[in-house]
Image (tube, rainbow, N blue to C red):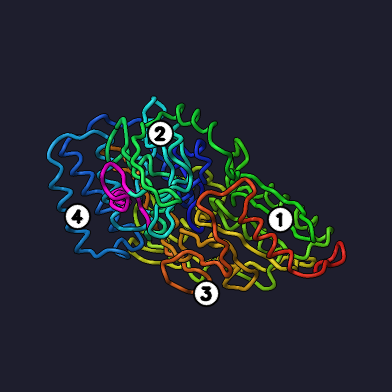
Amino acid sequence: MIRSACRSSRRSLLAPLFAAPLFAAVLAATPAGAAEAPSHPATISAADARDDLRQLYATLQASHFDLYARVSKADYDRLYRRTLAEIRGPATYAETAVRFQRFVAFGKVAHARIDAIYALFDQHMAGGGKAFPLLIRVVGDKVLVADNRSGSDQVRRGDEITALDGRPIGEWLVLCGRDLSADTPYMAHALMELDLPMLLWLERGPVERFEVAIRRADGQVAKLDLPARTAAEMKAAAKAEPAVLARDANARVARMLPDHVAYLQPGPFYNSAPGAVDEYDNSAFRAFVDGAFQDFLAAGATSLIIDLRDNPGGDSSFSDLMVRWFADRPFRFNASFRIKVSAAAVAANAKRVALAPDDGSSVSARYAAAYAKARPGQVIAFDDAPTPPKPEPRFKGAVYALINRNSYSNTVAVAATMQDYRLGRVIGEETSDLATTYGAMETFTLAHSGLVVGFPKARIVRPDGDLTPRGVVPDLAIATPPVEGVDDPVLTAAIDLARRRGPPVQAGRSQ
């Protein structure tokens, strides 16, 4: 079943320009953005906005697995009263979307959010609008330039941004964080690494120029006046920049490397084929994975790197097909999967069931059967049976799962499963998405604005039962440079580690 986020409807138009990873935080069977209404009112009256806010808070209270997991009810109630009081006159659809997203984001749960702000920014850029022309990477308390699309040769990748428009950059991270649904600051910063141009647009509106203070590697500080850029201008500026590593998160790659090291990039854990009708059809993925492991065994592979960096995740019915090739015991991707039953969750699920009413074995059909035995507000268990290892032959060499901060959703579950069952070593960079999470997102629609609101109906606990709200911490950290060169230094380090595994096994046999 879906563990958490699937692919994202939140990808900015700037993402291809910056070769940035796809953030995938939309969950469960219905991506929030995909359900966004194709049209919406230009303005919303104060009365309608207040009605929508009442509906928003009441439905979140009834449907969110734990709305007060990260903030107190008293604080949320105060925000509700303040937000209600601030609605004094008509507002645009965009203003309403931002106001309500900030209200939802206050709860600090990634899978509770309104994705309309992303579509609004995409429309702004597609219409020739301009945005902040730098992409960042947050490393500790420093904000570094990860990519420069300003056209200015005074900015270099790796420069530290110390201030923006006369304010310390740390203040901007706090301001921009108001618009992000994120469980932890680390997650918020990872999202800002892709979305800062949009977030600054939400905070400032359209602007023509930015005053940026930077500190270079030699310690010198400079103040630069950078113009806002259109998408076309950023694309043109990109041609003057040295090439950087660009990974295709959708690619499925299997190959042998020297010294009997196998490399597998499984790609998304859903049917990502162009024009795919059934996102849960895993037949092509099964054929790819089975063929890859058969080739690895035939080539005498002694170690395997599974590259999960920037992977948007998906469904465990895909990832289990991979893990069972090297598992030595039955495994589950969670210690518990509990769902809060609500009218909103039932209604959202019923829409999916209606699309395939005869498929009684689907996850949606199983949800419907469970809901039929429960009452609104009740928390029920929804746990799958353990997945058994694949019958022999299996891969028995050393397995390394390579992760980074942009490994999301079911990808995080794969890494946690490998770590908790000791099926392999997790290497790389800590994930920003959580190993124990509030997920399995559903949506409801606000009556007047038409805004689609996502909420997590479930709490999913990692296999070892650890409730700490943190990502998967690698067994062996591999430092990720702020700017990754085309030589892929992280993968090079992972390969060096895998090469030390030992002598090869006989071709065609597992170790």
The residue to which callout 2 is attached is 122
Quarter of the rendering occupied by the C terminus: bottom right
Q: Which mark is residue 79?
A: 4
N-term-proximal mark, 2 vs 4: 4
Q: CA distance from mark 3 to mark 1?
A: 27 Å
The residue to which callout 3 is attached is 464
N-term-proximal mark, 3 vs 2: 2
Give, as a single range, the part of the protein colored magenta. 163-182
At x 84%, y 65%, the residue is 509
Q: CA distance from mark 4 to mark 3?
A: 36 Å
Callout 2–callout 4 Cβ contact below 8 Å: no
Amino acid of disc 2: Asp
What kind of element bears circle 2? helix
Amino acid of disc 3: Asp
The residue to which callout 1 is attached is 263
In the displayed structure, 421 sits above or below 220; it is: below
Callout 3–callout 1 Cβ contact below 8 Å: no
